[in-house]
Amino acid sequence: MKSRRGFTLIEIMVALAIITIALGAIIENTAASTSNAAHLRDKTVASWVAMNQLALYRARREWGSASNRKGQVEMAGREWQWKLKIRKTEDPNLRRLEIDVSPADDDTQILSSLTGFIGKL
């Protein structure tokens, strides 16, 4: 009579433990990657909002004293809040524009900051 050789219960339990640990690591890694992708998407869209606000200010050719402005805009299906600081520079014909962008529901989380300049025409 030939003896049949199969897996013992301990071998099966060890294999299942290894599979469980590996699957747990894969799920954790996938969740972290998804979170990072969402954060990078938000930072990218926030930088577009900042660039758009700078371009709009330049296109209007406004010239005024140093001041602060703020507003909200919708982009990529989400509301964003921007804050524009207009500062004087050493050159009286040049202004420094600083734009900070954050989600509309959390103005403490600045996702993008952009600095630009505008000259008096």
Image (cartoon, helix red, strand yellow):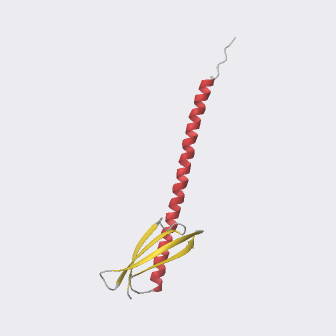
Whole-percent x, y for residue 77 in the image: 60, 68
What is the residue that sits farthest to the right in this orientation? Answer: 1
Quadrant placement of the N terminus: top right
Residue 97's place in the image compared with 24, above or below, is below
In the displayed structure image, the side of residue 108 where residue 88 appears, left or right = left
Residue 82's place in the image compared with 12, above or below, is below
Q: Which residue is found at the position 55% from the left and 46% from the top?
A: 28
Q: Which residue is found at the position 57% from the left and 73% from the top?
A: 74
What is the residue that sits farthest to the left in this orientation? Answer: 90
Residue 38's place in the image compared with 94, above or below, is above
Q: Which residue is found at the position 32% from the left and 85% from the top?
A: 92
Residue 93's place in the image compared with 1, above or below, is below
Q: Along the line of sight, which residue is nearer the eye, 60 or 111?
A: 111
Q: Which residue is found at the position 59% from the left and 37% from the top?
A: 20
Whole-percent x, y for residue 19 in the image: 58, 36
| Numbered disc total | 0
What is the residue that sits farthest to the top in this orientation? Answer: 1
Whole-percent x, y for residue 110 in the image: 46, 66
In the displayed structure image, the side of residue 82 where residue 64 appears, left or right = left
Whole-percent x, y for residue 21 in the image: 55, 37
Quadrant placement of the C terminus: bottom left
